[in-house]
Image (cartoon, helix red, strand yellow):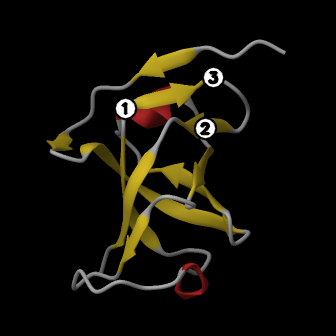
Amino acid sequence: MTFAILTACTNSEDSNGVSFSATVLENNESYLLVEPKEGSTELNSADRIKVSVNDATLLDSQDMEIKIDDIQIGMQTEIFYNGQIAESYPAQIGKCYRIKLLD
């Protein structure tokens, strides 16, 4: 199996890397499976992306820390990561720094 790393340039970039908005498709406690929003650069890479939550800070829409159990299927999120996407299926992001729920 071959993996390639893509570097994504997105609309949103801050000191914690780049970010994209996505809908949660699955929550298995150690990772989220998400679908990038229409128009995002990440959607050009894959329609489903696996996001490891092991090292990520999880926040609600008011920037209060939450637990992985608080994230439900169908919720809208902003994923902050290092800009690298492994070309697999589903795709996987390199390192996730923060996941924030959106209103």
Mark 3 vs mark 1, CA separation in Å? 13 Å
**Is 2 placed left or right of 55 in the picture?**
right
Please state which amino acid type lies under the numbered disc 2: Gln
Dividing the image into 4 quarters, which one contains the N terminus?
top right
The residue pinned by badge 1 equals 83
Q: Earlier in the sequence, mark 1 or mark 2?
A: 1
Please state which amino acid type lies under the numbered disc 1: Gly
Residue 24, image x and y in percent? 56, 65
Dividing the image into 4 quarters, which one contains the C terminus?
bottom left
* As drawn, 88 above or below 63: above
Residue 92: numbered disc: 2
Q: Quadrant of residue 100?
A: bottom left
Please state which amino acid type lies under the numbered disc 3: Glu
Q: Residue at x 23, y 80 (%)?
A: 63
* As drawn, 83 above or below 61: above
10 Å crowding of disc 3: few (<14), some (14-19), many (20+): some
Residue 87: numbered disc: 3
